[in-house]
Image (cartoon, helix red, strand yellow):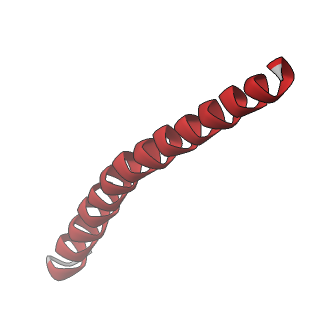
Amino acid sequence: MLEEERGDTNFVAIIIIIVILIAIAGIFKDQLEKAIKKVFDSLTNFIDNGF
């Protein structure tokens, strides 16, 4: 019975780690989208003002 409880504890830990990783990925996704938008805005301004 002790081994089964350890398995349950490991399962809960894995689920918590997965949730944390998804949250971190969401944060970086927003930052990455903002960075790409800035690059394309700069590129558009460069093209509009001429080479």
Residue in the image at 41% along x and 45% along y? 23
Of residues 1 and 11, the one drawn nearer to the viewer in this rendering: 1
Measuring from the top left, give residue 39's x and y in whole percent. 30, 62
Q: Taking 9 as reference, is 40 left or right?
A: left
Q: Is residue 41 above or below residue 30?
A: below
Of residues 30 and 15, the one drawn nearer to the viewer in this rendering: 15
- Position of the N terminus by quadrant: top right
Q: Residue furthest top?
A: 2
Measuring from the top left, give residue 35's x and y in whole percent. 31, 55
Q: Quadrant of residue 10?
A: top right
- Position of the C terminus by quadrant: bottom left
Q: Is residue 19 above or below residue 9?
A: below
Of residues 48 and 17, the one drawn nearer to the viewer in this rendering: 17
Residue in the image at 59% along x and 42% along y? 15
Q: Residue furthest front?
A: 1
Of residues 3 and 45, the one drawn nearer to the viewer in this rendering: 3
Q: Is residue 37 above or below residue 26?
A: below
Residue in the image at 26% along x and 58% along y? 34
Measuring from the top left, give residue 11's x and y in whole percent. 69, 37
Q: Quadrant of residue 47?
A: bottom left
Q: Taking 14 as reference, is 20 left or right?
A: left
| Label tally | 0
Q: Taking 3 as reference, is 49 left or right?
A: left
Residue in the image at 39% along x and 52% along y? 26
Q: Is residue 8 above or below residue 30?
A: above
